[in-house]
Amino acid sequence: MRILVLDDHPLFAEALGVFLRAGRPEIEIIAAGSVAEGQAALGRLGSVQLVVADLNMPGMDGGAGIALLRTAAPDAPIAVVSGEAPHPAAERVRALGASGFVPKTLRPPLLRAAILLIAEGGTYFPDQPPAQPPASSHPDAPKFTARERAILKAIACGQPNKQIAAALQVEEVTVKAHVTRILAKTGLRNRVQLALYAVKNDLGT
């Protein structure tokens, strides 16, 4: 998976890249410091699976730069990150075609899960439930065993099955079986959704 990160603060872009790649060595991060640099990078790369763009950087102009990025990468979802409060910025970027608005103030596991959810084709806006993961505060919410909770916490931290198995001193196939049961209990479809579910429901902290 190739992700283009646009932010005029190199340290944040670098930290976000390291954070997203934790436990996901297949992720490739390309960084750029402005919308113009992002357009140039997209021209060179040909395609990316996700564009992560800061709302307040050169060329973004309050969200207008989203249209430029959309033209340069028509098939890639765009996740807008910002230190601004969600309202009304989230509504603005949603109307401009972004697939998500992710506040930089989110807890790190939730920020990571939200961005990866968008990369997988979902949406995330803090003013409404995510498009794919269901709410779980309902009285009929699934109940998890202690082992399932431990695995959910590890997934929320981005750990792959092999690392989880080593930490729990079990076989990797056992972890896979637990993950399959957790997916069935929650009605979710993949590990990214599980990570977001875990953090949103205080199962991943």
Image: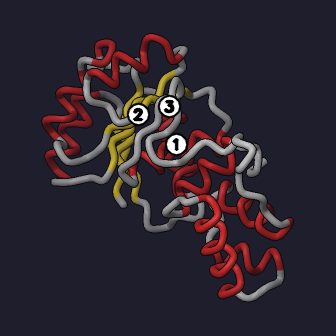
- Name the residue type under label 3: Val
Residue position for label 2:
100
Mark 1 sits on what residue?
114
Local crowd size for mark 3, using a 10 Å CA cut-off: few (<14), some (14–19), many (≥20):
many
Tell me where residue 201 appears, x and y as whole percent. 71, 43
Q: Secondary structure at mark 1?
A: helix
Residue type for callout 1: Ala
Q: Is residue 90 left or right of residue 126?
A: left
Picture layout, residue 97 above or below residue 43: above
Q: Quadrant of residue 46?
A: bottom left
Residue that appears at 39% across and 21% down: 55
Q: Are marks 1 and 3 in contact (CB under 8 Å)?
A: yes
Q: Residue at x 49, y 63 (%)?
A: 189
Q: Earlier in the sequence, mark 1 or mark 2?
A: 2
SS at circle 2 = strand
Q: Which mark is residue 165?
A: none
User: CA separation, marks 2 and 3?
Assistant: 6 Å
In terms of image quadrants, where is residue 120? bottom left
Rate crowding at label 2 as few (under 14), some (14 to 19) or many (20 or more) other CA atoms within 10 Å. many
C-alpha separation, residue under disc 1 versus residue under disc 2:
8 Å
- Residue 21 image position (x, y, % from top left): 52, 57
The residue closer to the viewer here, 51 or 57, is 51
Query: Residue 18's spot in the image, x, y percent?
Result: 55, 51
Q: Image quadrant for the N terminus? A: bottom left
CB under 8 Å between discs 2 and 3: yes
Pointers 1 and 2 in contact (CB under 8 A)? yes
> Vertically, is 192 above or below 146?
above
